[in-house]
Amino acid sequence: MTAPQKAPRSLAALPNLIFASRWLQLPLYIGLIAAQAIYVLHFWVELVHLVEAALGDKEALAILIKAVGYQSEAEVTGLNETIIMLVVLGLIDVVMISNLLIMVIVGGYETFVSRMNLENHPDQPEWLSHVNASVLKVKLGTAIIGISSIHLLKTFINAANYDQKTLMWQTAIHVTFLLSAMAIAATDRILHPAGQKHDAPH
């Protein structure tokens, strides 16, 4: 027989006010959802321009060339492999940033605001079942490294249009992101050894 659940203990006025202040984060997550919608719109605009340029639209081609910062000594009369690759990497970049937003919105809300009660829901993200502040930081760090890698790859593909100082700084920043994520992951492993369960704060 299942034991009856205890009724939630009421808090005093001041602790209740402090605890309720977590809902002030709700407008922030709603703002991130709006940013997500803008990224979706940007993705489709870029994709439409790519399709139009592939069909021979010179205006769409000019927009893409300006967007990716591509320059060539020879006149560009149509899509080439470099332009397509830069545009596609830009689309992948948008997707990865969108994934990052989802992790922040869903994981942050679940961790710091209120439970979403997604247990046994068929669409519950696998990572959400064991998310907490430490895990979220590691996942965000990994996502940022992925985004930085895409930016660095775009820069090296279009390296002729960047000076050496810019290339060196972008590489240094990427290495810094990588080392930071490794340090966060190592710290989390030291504080929470394998097999030790640590609950998310609520």
Image (cartoon, helix red, strand yellow):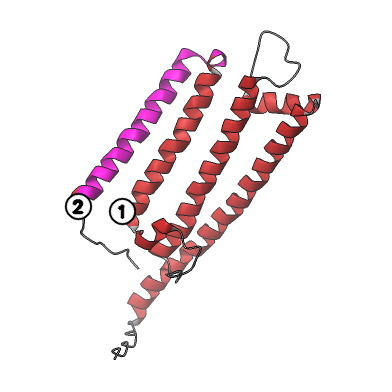
Residue in the foreground of this view, choosing between 60 and 166: 60
Q: Predominant secondary structure in magenta?
A: helix
Disc 2/disc 1 C-alpha distance (Å): 10 Å
For the record, the magenta segment spans 160-189
Residue in view at x 75 percent, y 28 percent = 53
> Would you say the residues marked 2 and 1 are in contact, meaning their CB atoms lie under 8 Å apart?
yes
Look at the image and tell me in which quarter the C terminus lies: bottom left
The crowding category of the residue bearing disc 1, from other C-alpha atoms within 10 Å (few below 14, some 14 to 19, many at least 20), is: some
Residue in view at x 68 percent, y 23 percent = 65
The crowding category of the residue bearing disc 2, from other C-alpha atoms within 10 Å (few below 14, some 14 to 19, many at least 20), is: few
Position in image of residue 130 (x %, y %): 34, 60
Q: Any mark on residue 134, and which?
A: 1
Question: What residue sits right under mark 2 in the picture?
Answer: 191
Above or below 84: residue 26:
below
Question: At numbered mark 2, what does the secondary structure look like: helix, strand or loop?
Answer: helix
Residue in the foreground of this view, choosing between 170 and 27: 170
